[in-house]
Amino acid sequence: MSISIAVRGLMAACAMAGSSTAFGQAFPARAMTVVMPLSPSTAFYVAMRQMADQIQAKVGKPVVLDPAVGAGGTLSPQRIKRADPDGYTIGLVYAAPLTVNPYVEKEPRYDPLKDFAYITMLTRHGILFAAGPKVPANNLQELIALAKSRPGGVKVGEGATGSRIGLLQLQEAGGVQFLDVPYKSSAEFDAALLSGEVDVVLSTVGTELGQIRGGRAKGIAIGSRNRSPLLPNVQSISEVYPNVEVISWYALFAPAGTPNDRIDWLHREWTAALKDPKIVERMQTVFGYEIVASTPQEVLDQIKREIPINSRIAKQYGISE
């Protein structure tokens, strides 16, 4: 009997040592870091800082936002892949670095299905197709008709590989060909739209809302399944082409092998901060983003849905980086 009791006691001690509260060391016991593909001047970075401050005040440990800007958003996944899987270093990522970049690079630097543990999808948003005020198209059907009348003559500005793949999806659905004009940033393609250098841009509601309300641009379609509450008169692409979705999103993720209890803790605390009314209002009314606060599995499911579409288009059209 005494041996059995001793064995059970040893097993319990071992289990406790493997948990996040081993020997009284509750998680988090020290500072946490979020690797960000955004610079501190961006609006979403500011929103992340507000959420991090809430968590920091609650647990009494610093939450550091560490910018890793450039390389098409892939620096954050690269660093998270190499980080210790202890929950203290996590990353923010948007869709393309996980669902596009590994399938257009000659030597992928990470595998989105094997190298990471997902925490939550924070927000989701449709990519907005916005046209210059003089373009003779006011909705998606008219844009497609214009493209058919000018094969390769409708110039579309975009600033990311993910947007390029979204444009190709619309091309296929509509049986048309656009002239893709890549830029380095939204500031560049916005200037091109205002000057008439391009006819259409692929952007976000938050970026184009002021231009549209001021009559300097007009919304043609949005890539999400539903219309944006900020632009209720702009149709969704799915209203015309039900199988086409052109979206992006922001998610939090960790290195593969991060203990489940720490993923659970991170999910609980970050989604609670995300649901703060001030954060919700900012996300919805300033950015035009949908609050998601998904489960970890739902992030992985979304990635698995997007990869076959993006990899097929990248291969078919020879997209590479």
Image: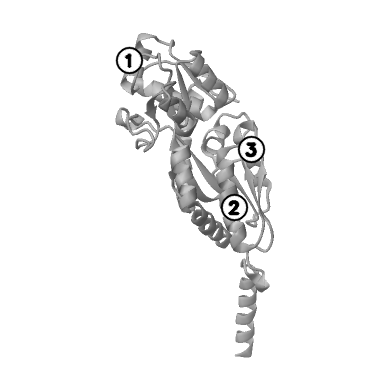
- x and y, in percent, of residue 42 in the image: 59, 37
Please indicate, yes or no, whether residue 98 appears anywhere in the rendered image. Answer: yes
First in sequence: mark 2 vs mark 1: 2
Q: Which mark is residue 13?
A: none
Q: Is residue 106 above or below residue 45?
A: above
Q: Are marks 2 and 1 in contact (CB under 8 Å)?
A: no
Check disc 3 and give the amino acid type.
Answer: Ser
Q: Is residue 75 above or below residue 137?
A: below
Q: Which mark is residue 52?
A: 2
Q: Which mark is residue 39?
A: 3
- x and y, in percent, of residue 167 in the image: 44, 24
Disc 1 marks which residue?
145
Check disc 1 and give the amino acid type.
Answer: Ala
Q: Are marks 2 and 3 in contact (CB under 8 Å)?
A: no
Mark 2 or mark 1: which is in front? 2
Label 1: state its secondary structure.
helix
- x and y, in percent, of residue 215 in the image: 41, 22
Q: Residue furthest bottom?
A: 1
| Color style of the picture | one colour
